[in-house]
Amino acid sequence: MRPRIALRERLQALTQFTDLGLAKPLLKALAEEGYQAPTPIQAKAIPGVLAGRDLLGIAQTGTGKTAAFALPILQRLAEDRRPAPRRGCRALVLSPTRELATQIAESFKTYGRHLGLTVAVVFGGVKYGPQMRALAGGIDVLVATPGRLLDHMEQKSINVGATEIFVLDEADQMLDLGFLVPIRKVVRELPKERQNLFFSATMPGEIGKLAGEMLRDPQKVEVTPQSTTVERVNQQVLFVEQQRKRALLAELFDDPAFTRVIVFTRTKRGADRVAKSLEQGGVEAAAIHGDKSQGQRERALAAFKAGQVRALVATDIAARGIDIDAVTHVVQYELPNVPEAYVHRIGRTARAGAKGSAVAFCADDERNLLRDIQKVTRQAIPSFDRRNDRHLGAALAVMGELKGVREERPAQPHRSEQKPSHSARGRRSGANPHGGSGAKAHGGEARPATKPAYGGSAAKPAGGRGRKRPQGARAEGGGGSPWSNWTSR
């Protein structure tokens, strides 16, 4: 046990990037970005990766794991200078979404700006020509989504047979999106002698099996317990009728503290409807989902980062693909079918050491989803009952009169566009197994099974036509909105 204790003490003593044995060009780039102290996963992972070991990293989003593998990979490639193989790469990073792939590639370029290494990114939804030209001469670091990478491999525009380092990032989301088969196809083409880095926020059975197939005597780095939520996030569940969610969302944005907010929906159409409703209420909003073109998604993210829009309404395609430090709040307009997705959604706030707030709306038909979330996260999330709230009823009536918007019936949770995998929920996955060639595939999103249903007048009781009052519902009466009481805590 003594060697393990000594190693743990040394890791605890590593408080600066200069202690990790990184080369001067990397330290210079980090200093230019204002980074001095490594995060726990960086301090634990970088020495082992530099030594050439395989790594199994279990870390939530926002813990700094991109730098944990990018920095030592850049150093290893720079120390062993050699030409990248023609139509090949020396290091390959697989990522589940276009947004995350783009951000990982940008991190490699930022950290390696003084090393002269080449970095490229390939994903679906854009033309093949520029990607093929970028790959033709060989690339030091290639970041790719599984579907588009397989497309290039089938067209012989890339050969991964000489890859020295392979990184699988966000492995559990890869599984949720149905990428397990494509990943195995890619791995079969990789050389047997390579370094493998495997990262996942959770470790369900299928992911553990895949890790066992890929890794050889790996160093295991776990910086937080599996499936626990970020401690710095102030969480709250608001029980509310489905028909009154739009009014409750509008009420939240009356609070000036909601300056940069991500709102999550289950469906692409739902995201568009919520964004439109916010715009009608005077809140600048943009939607991002799998049916948007790459250009539309990039413009929406750029506007959100620049503060030109207060709300970014997204499906779970963005749950792990948005890396913006200043997100003040996450609102879950609809709860996710896969409980682990709750963790990744709220991980969009409280980044880079900051605090953040997350609020989830829960209708009566979402109670089972909430129970699954609390079971997986091992916590009872504080809740507040806004059902039968007369303020929301009056606000919804006004919204209906002014906007001509009719009440929408609840979207059934099982009609989700982000369908869980076998391992995540024991149900059939609806994701495209290739996920690469078009905008729809990379999001892991299928088309809604039914068209949205509408019924009743906006001024009708909140329960909707013919629905009974939920058991245990209590009227809030008067006295103003309780939301400000929670946000001031």
Image (cartoon, rainbow, N blue to C red):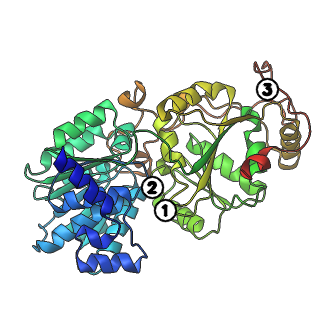
Disc 2: which residue: 62
Which residue appears at 49% of the width and 51% of the height?
Answer: 318
Left or right, 403 with respect to 51, comes to: right
Q: CA distance from mark 3 to mark 1?
A: 41 Å
Amino acid type indicated by mark 1: Ala
- Classify residue 187 as left or right of residue 37: left
Can residue 358 be seen from the camera position used here?
yes
Discs 2, 1 touching: Cβ within 8 Å: yes
The mark lying in front, picked from 3 and 1, is 1
| Position of 174 relative to 388 (above/below) | below
Q: Secondary structure at mark 2?
A: loop
Q: Is residue 136 visible?
A: no
Q: Tell which of 298 and 27 is nearer to you.
A: 27
The residue depicted at 11 percent of the width and 74 percent of the height is 81
Label 1 belongs to which residue? 352
Residue shown at 75% from the left, 61% from the top: 256
> Splitting the image into 4 quarters, where does residue 284 fall?
bottom right
Q: Quadrant of the N terminus?
A: top left
Crowd around label 1: few <14 · some 14–19 · many ≥20 (10 Å) = some
Q: Earlier in the sequence, mark 3 or mark 1?
A: 1
Q: Are marks 2 and 3 in contact (CB under 8 Å)?
A: no
Q: Does label 2 or label 1 sit earlier along the sequence?
A: 2
Of the pair 223 and 324, the residue shown nearer to us? 223
Q: Residues within 10 Å of mark 2 (few under 14, many from 20)?
A: many
Cα separation, mark 2 vs mark 1, equals 7 Å
Amino acid at the residue labelled 2: Gly
Q: Position of residue 437 (x, y in %)?
A: 35, 51
Amino acid beneath label 3: Gly
Eye-nearest disc, 2 or 3:
2
